[in-house]
C-alpha cells in the first residue's frame, strides 16, 4: 500500500491552496498517496486522525505577519501528538506562502519570521524535518478575490516590494511563487518518507 501523506493548509486568497494541490500532484508522481485538507473549510471534528499518515505537511498563507486562524489552531492542537508521532517515524514538513519570500535577499528572513517563530511558539522546532518559505501571489487585477482594505494593504506591500527590486505589474495577477523550489521541497520530503527514517 502506498505511503500516506496529509497536506493540511490554511489559505485566505487561494495561493497556498494552489501550492497544496500542486504538492499533491508531485507526491502522486512519487508513488505516494496524498490527502489535501483545507483547514479553513473543514470543521475541526472532521480533521483526519494523524495516526493514519506516514508524512504530514502543514502550510499557511501570511497576512499581516500571521498564519490563518485554523492553520495556527491545527499546529497548537496537534503539537504534542506530532512530536509523539515523529518519534515513531512520522515525517513532518512546514511551509508558508508570503510576499517577503518573493523579495530578493529576504527569503531567510521570511523563514525566520513566518516559519521558525510559530514553530518555536508551539515548541515544535525540533519535530520538523524540512521547512521553507515560498513566494506568494500579488493579485492586483480587477478580478482579485480581495476586499477593498485587503487590496489597499496588498498595494502598499507591493510598493515596498518594488523598492526592494521586485517588478510587479499593475492591474495583473503577479504570481511570485517559484514552482521549482516547491517541487524540490516535495521531492526531498518524499525521499524522507520513502526512506522511512
Ligand atoms: C492583506 C494582505 C496582507 C499581507 N501581509 C503580508 C505580510 O505581512 N507579510 C508577507 O510576507 N506577505 C504578506 N501578504 C502577501 C501574502 O502572504 C501572499 O499574497 C500569499 O500568497 C497569500 O497566501 P494565500 O492566498 O494562501 O492567503 C499579504 C497579502 C495581503 C492581501
Image (spheres, helix red, strand yellow):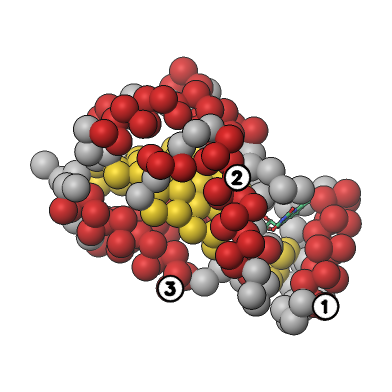
Residue occupied by mark 1 = 163
Please give the label number shown on residue 117.
2
- Please tell me which residue is depicted at 58% across the width and 41% down the height of the picture: 118
- Please tell me which residue is depicted at 51% across the width and 47% down the height of the picture: 59
Q: Alpha-carbon neighbours of circle 2 within 10 Å: few (<14), some, or many (≥20)?
A: some
Q: Is residue 26 left or right of residue 12?
A: left
Q: Alpha-carbon neighbours of circle 3 within 10 Å: few (<14), some, or many (≥20)?
A: few
Q: Is residue 42 left or right of residue 189?
A: right
Q: Position of residue 178 (x, y in %)?
A: 52, 71
Q: Nearer the viewer, residue 123 or 69?
A: 123
**In this orientation, does residue 15 appear?**
no
- Above/below status of 84 relative to 184: above
Mark 1 or mark 2, which is nearer the start of the sequence? 2
Q: Nearer the viewer, residue 35 or 84?
A: 84
Q: Position of residue 46 (x, y in %)?
A: 44, 22
In whole angstroms, how far apart are the C-alphas of marks 3 and 2? 25 Å
- Above/below status of 170 relative to 119: below
Q: Nearer the viewer, residue 108 or 160?
A: 108
Q: Position of residue 146 (x, y in %)?
A: 77, 51
Residue occupied by mark 3 = 180
Amino acid at each position: 500500500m502506498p505511503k500516506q501523506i496529509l497536506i493540511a493548509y490554511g489559505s485566505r486568497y487561494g495561493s497556498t491552496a494552489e501550492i497544496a494541490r500542486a504538492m499533491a500532484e508531485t507526491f502522486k508522481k512519487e508513488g505516494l498517496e496524498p490527502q489535501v485538507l483545507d483547514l479553513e473549510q473543514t470543521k475541526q471534528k472532521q480533521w483526519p486522525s494523524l495516526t493514519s499518515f506516514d508524512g504530514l505537511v502543514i502550510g499557511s498563507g501570511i497576512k499581516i505577519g500571521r498564519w490563518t486562524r485554523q492553520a495556527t489552531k491545527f499546529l497548537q492542537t496537534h503539537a504534542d501528538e506530532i512530536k509523539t508521532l515523529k518519534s515513531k517515524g512520522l515525517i513532518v514538513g512546514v511551509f508558508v506562502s508570503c510576499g517577503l519570500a518573493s523579495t530578493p535577499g529576504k527569503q531567510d528572513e521570511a523563514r525566520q519570521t513566518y516559519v521558525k517563530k510559530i514553530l518555536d511558539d508551539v515548541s515544535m522546532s525540533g519535530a520538523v524535518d524540512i521547512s521553507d518559505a515560498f513566494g506568494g501571489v500579488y493579485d492586483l487585477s480587477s478580478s482579485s478575490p480581495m476586499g477593498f482594505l485587503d487590496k489597499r494593504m496588498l498595494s502598499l506591500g507591493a510598493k515596498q516590494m518594488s523598492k526592494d527590486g521586485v517588478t510587479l505589474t499593475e492591474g495583473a495577477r503577479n504570481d511570485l511563487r517559484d514552482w521549482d523550489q516547491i517541487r524540490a521541497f516535495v521531492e526531498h520530503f518524499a525521499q524522507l518518507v520513502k526512506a522511512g527514517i
